[in-house]
Amino acid sequence: MINELDGVDRESMIRVNFSVTQNQLVQAYGLDNVKYFPQNATAGFSSRSATFLSLVGLPHSEVFTSREDLEDPYPAALDAITLGSRFDHYGIPCPAESQSWWTLGYLFTSLIALDPASGKVYAFPEGSSGYLPLHRDVESLVYALIEFRKLEVDHDSDVDPEELSARFRETVGAFDPTPFADDESQWNRSLEELEHGLW
């Protein structure tokens, strides 16, 4: 993916203020592990989400796998970005309201999607026919991923797992409480695994 600015006023994009910066994302994941989405003026797409994805980007790692080559392994005629088309390809029922949502990637075993109109981020857990709210917006998702990368580094340095879990919940929850609102959310399940020494 490359950063394209097709017909978009670059000055207005620069004026958008984000708490999460491209520099923070690159420091956490490295330049080669940041993916950018093309910027365009798609009708019905949250301009804040589109700007964030094209200027700040998404990380790509073992924990969060960003969508990359959208044509492979899909047939050329398939729209692999939208959930409806993707789910139809695999013969999976897709909730009607999420047919037009965009695939962002995978967080652990959950498919992560963006509602382009509202800017909210949802998780489709593996083996489930439904979805859960995961983040208020894509900036919150990336903020959590940066904090999770710090947690991984500290875990490798033998910091107490319960301390790491508590720190992550407090830091990320102060930015956006949505990731922990549902007991079955991917974040809650992953932190429970950490606390029980399953990493």
Image (cartoon, rainbow, N blue to C red):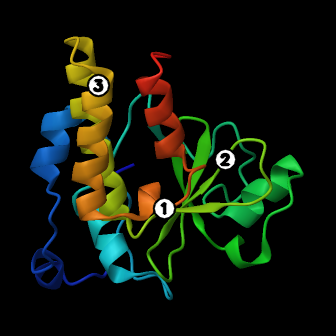
191 left or right of 148 in image: right
Earlier residue among tags 1 and 3: 3
Count of labels shown? 3
The residue wearing badge 1 is 181
Q: Residue at image x 28%, y 53%?
A: 172
Q: Which mark is residue 125?
A: 2
**Image location of residue 48, percent across then percent down:** 30, 78
The residue wearing badge 3 is 152
Question: In the image, which is nearer the foreground, mark 1 or mark 3?
Answer: 1
Alpha carbon distance from label 1 to label 3: 22 Å
Alpha carbon distance from label 1 to label 2: 15 Å
Secondary structure found at label 3: helix
Is 57 in front, or is 170? 170
Q: Residue at image x 64%, y 64%?
A: 82
Question: In the image, which is nearer the foreground, mark 1 or mark 2?
Answer: 1
Kind of residue sitting beneath label 3: Glu
